[in-house]
Image: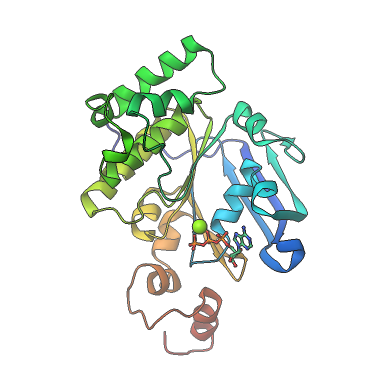
Amino acid sequence: MPVSPETRPRTQNEPMLELTGLSVSYSGGAVRALQDVSLTVHRGQIVVLLGVNGAGKTTTLSTVCGLLPFTGGTVDAGTVLFDGEDLKGKNPSSRVHRGISMVMEGRRVFPDLTVEENLVAGGFTRTAAESREARDRVLTMFPILAGRRKQMAGLMSGGEQQMLAIGRALMQRPTLLMLDEPSLGLAPLIVQQIKQHIVDINAEGTSVLLIEQNAAMALSIADYAYVLDGKTVAHHGTGAELLADSSVQELYLGIAGEGRRSFRGAREERREGGPL
Ligand SMILES: Nc1ncnc2c1ncn2[C@@H]1O[C@H](COP(=O)(O)OP(=O)(O)OP(=O)(O)O)[C@@H](O)[C@H]1O
Ligand SMILES: [Mg+2]
């Protein structure tokens, strides 16, 4: 049975993912993407990462997944701990083995493979029996995929492809699922369905780190949230605290907005009695 986003239990157990003082650059140090970023996902939580374009959201997830060597990025400082273990030097597939899965930006399904083949591809580190069991779980969770098992993924709607991308990440039975802007470009009704799926996945015991530009959706289900601005964490608090914050309201919720000033700029103006 679906869990109501408003009534699901809020938990704060031990830290699962801990980023401390993380600084990342690209192109041999020419582009600084993250500066001294610290954030924590506690076991069982949904944690949201907000930020305008170029703030470093995707870079944060790529760092956790170990993808920086493939995108020309370098960790200049800081640590990434997962279940207390330093992930430095661990390759992406060993991070998947440890329980970290990611749904990348832009619903990258294999368009020429069927829904079922996409799912099987997602379970690449599992035995055939584990993969079958995971596939059945995913198809139960996403009835829309069950009805289209034999359909080519490239022929499905954007919303269906996003469900498939999430389902494929779940094939690894992750303990931490990271999603990079899953609602991007989707109709409001589909965004609501995705939100419910994220809540249900979390209710089954998977911790979630969610990147979103749809702040209203994300903060409504966030146990905790961080705002990246100027490549670092400018603000953090519970979902309810950030929803009530006037800077967040202006920059991310379109309330009393006056264009795209930085989060810091908005806060400083507010402190100085400016136009907020
Ligand atoms: N592979 C790369 N090579 C060089 N610079 C990069 C690379 N990837 C990202 N950057 C730069 O790093 C900074 C952070 O980018 P990132 O993609 O992490 O931001 P983002 O918050 O995910 O943005 P968006 O909302 O547009 O997805 C930006 O200045 C970007 O141009
Ligand atoms: Mg991004």
40 vs 168: above or below? below
Residue drawn at x 57%, y 22% as measured from the top left: 125
Residue drawn at x 43%, y 55% as measured from the top left: 212
Give the x, y percent position of residue 224: 49, 51
Q: Quadrant of the C terminus?
A: bottom left
Give the x, y percent position of residue 140: 30, 22
Foreground residue, 64 or 252?
A: 64
Foreground residue, 31 or 237?
A: 31
Foreground residue, 134 or 200?
A: 134
Foreground residue, 234 or 105?
A: 105
Q: Quadrant of the N terminus?
A: top left
Quadrant of the displayed image that contains ligand 1: bottom right
134 vs 13: above or below? above
Give the x, y percent position of residue 27: 71, 62
- Give the residue at the far front of this rendering: 112
How many numbered marks appear?
0
State the image quarter where residue 36 is shown: bottom right
153 vs 234: above or below? above
Q: In this orientation, does residue 108 appear? A: yes
Residue drawn at x 66%, y 47% as measured from the top left: 70
How is colour applied across the structure in the image?
A: rainbow
Q: In this orientation, does residue 7 appear? A: no
- Give the residue at the far top of this rendering: 129
Residue drawn at x 39%, y 53% as measured from the top left: 218
Residue 261 horizontal side relative to residue 250, left or right: right
Residue 140 horizontal side relative to residue 47, left or right: left
State the image quarter where residue 151 is shown: top left
State the image quarter where residue 15 is shown: top right
Residue 102 horizontal side relative to residue 168, left or right: right
Give the x, y percent position of residue 119: 41, 26
